[in-house]
Image: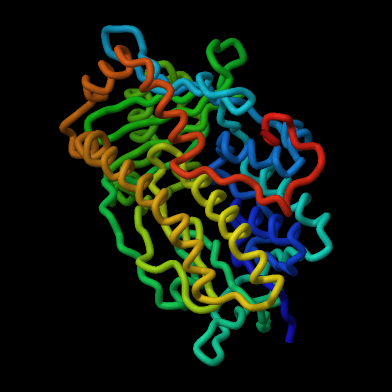
């Protein structure tokens, strides 16, 4: 039976970041990813300022900046009958962390996996699914794996960390049930082409609201990544109405994009996200820790889920590496991670619930088709508002720094400060 110091189930941003950090501490760590590669479109593809700073602290900034990416510098709200208002200006943050990097997540994950692979204690198992937990003497001792050939095997570990998302198989196997909060919408992601002559920020975020629906467009170098929001339970209706009706909805919300909605070839081009907002009552059992979406599924409101998950991973590595090197991870050690990361999670989720109630709920109910006037007034009259939102989105309530054991030469002067 194979064994390792820590097994991480889920090769997303949190799982690979945790694997990289623990491996740099000298811990034997195995990350298990059920897919054969990272090429899955329309995952979250934002890299926040706190993560860019973390990458610099790890001495990987030069390689990261060579990856194809664009920079989101502002959130702009259209105002009917008036000039647009800038709700958030990331340029007000201290350089070089004054933007959100926008890149396909597969590039970011491959980058993290390559950095981790340089550490002798790191192993990445692709096409391996974590299907259950190994328990012994009241403690989780490892996981049961399904191999690419369909066979099963056990992998024992001093600690199991579940980073396998909002539908976490290990969370379910542990019997850890989350508290769920109401969410008024689901999201359908798709792309539309962006013409070379179109002006404006290479990366920008522009929302549009209509009765019972909304649209958010992320400007990329040669395409728009579009999030269409409609009330929960609307997927069946959208499928019945067909692609022509969907094209008309998009054209009505963004008339300037009406000339290219035919790029939506069929409804198979839509990627449906069942939006959830929940949080575990307890993030751990003896020998098992849940972080990221496995511990707290986030709404896409604010786009902060990836950032929060990576911050969880940094805190977990910092607090657990010494115990893992001793081979004696206790329930008290796991509790320290939860105590550290629960408060920022509660703060962010509370803010998202307020956004759902004040903006998205009324829009989905057909009661509002524009941003509340008080929001526009505050953004125009109080410049501090334009700096506060980027700070909260870009760094979060409790940003984490790379632990000393994970830092390498090459960190930028700003990261070392």
> Where does residue 137 sit, x and y in percent of width and height?
53, 92
Q: Is 54 above or below relative to 123? A: above
Residue 321 is situated, as x and y percent measured from the top left of the image, at 66, 64
Residue furthest front in the image: 417
- Which residue appears at 28% of the width and 51% of the height? 233
Residue furthest left in the image? 367
Query: Residue 68 sits in which quadrant?
Result: top right
Q: Can residue 239 be seen in this view?
A: no
The image shows residue 274, relative to residue 79, as above or below, that is below
Q: Which residue does the image show at 52% across and 43% down from the upper left? A: 399
Q: Is residue 132 left or right of residue 413?
A: left
Image vertical order of residue 251 relative to residue 381, above or below: below
- Name the foreground residue: 292 vs 317: 317
| Left or right placement of residue 249 versus residue 400 in this view | left
Quadrant the C terminus occupies: top right
Residue 232, given in percent of the width and then of the height, sits at: 28, 49
Residue occupying image coordinates x 21% and y 20%: 373
Residue 164, visible in the rendered structure: yes
């Amino acid at each position: 039976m194979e064994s390792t110091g820590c097994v991480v189930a889920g090769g997303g941003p949190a799982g690979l970041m945790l694997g990289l950090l623990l491996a740099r501490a000298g811990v034997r760590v195995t990350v298990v990813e059920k897919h054969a590669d990272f090429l899955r479109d329309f995952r979250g593809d934002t890299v926040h300022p706190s993560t860019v700073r973390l990458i610099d602290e790890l001495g990987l900034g030069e390689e990261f900046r060579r990856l194809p990416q664009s920079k989101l510098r502002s959130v702009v709200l259209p105002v009917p009958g008036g000039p647009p208002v800038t709700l958030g200006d990331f340029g007000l943050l201290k350089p070089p962390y004054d933007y959100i990097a926008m890149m396909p997540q597969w590039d970011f994950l491959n980058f993290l996996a390559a950095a981790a692979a340089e550490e002798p204690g790191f192993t990445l198992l692709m096409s391996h699914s974590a299907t259950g937990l190994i328990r012994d003497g009241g403690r989780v001792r490892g996981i049961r794996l399904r191999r690419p050939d369909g066979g099963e095997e056990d992998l024992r570990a001093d600690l199991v960390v579940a980073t396998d998302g909002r539908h976490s198989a290990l969370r379910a196997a542990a019997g850890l049930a989350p508290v769920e909060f109401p969410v008024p919408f689901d999201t359908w992601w798709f792309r539309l082409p962006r013409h070379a002559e179109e002006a404006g920020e290479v990366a920008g975020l522009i929302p549009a609201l209509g009765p019972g629906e909304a649209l958010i467009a992320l400007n990329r170098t040669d395409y728009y990544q579009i999030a269409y929001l409609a009330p929960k339970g609307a997927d069946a209706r959208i499928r019945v109405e067909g692609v022509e009706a969907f094209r008309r909805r998009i054209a009505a919300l963004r008339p300037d994009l009406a000339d290219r909605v035919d790029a939506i070839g069929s409804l198979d081009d839509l990627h449906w996200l069942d939006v959830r907002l929940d949080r575990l009552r307890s993030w751990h059992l003896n020998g098992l820790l849940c972080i990221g979406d496995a511990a707290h599924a986030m709404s896409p409101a604010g786009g902060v889920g990836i950032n929060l998950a990576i911050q969880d991973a940094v805190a977990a590595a910092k607090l657990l590496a010494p115990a893992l090197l001793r081979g004696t991870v206790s329930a008290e050690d796991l509790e320290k991670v939860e105590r550290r990361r629960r408060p920022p999670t509660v703060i962010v989720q509370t803010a998202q619930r307020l956004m759902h109630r004040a903006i998205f709920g009324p829009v989905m109910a057909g009661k509002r088709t524009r941003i509340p006037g008080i929001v526009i007034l505050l953004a125009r009259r109080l410049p501090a508002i334009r700096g506060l939102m980027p700070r909260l989105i870009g760094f979060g309530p409790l940003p984490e720094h790379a632990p000393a054991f994970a830092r390498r030469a090459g960190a930028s002067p700003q990261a070392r400060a």
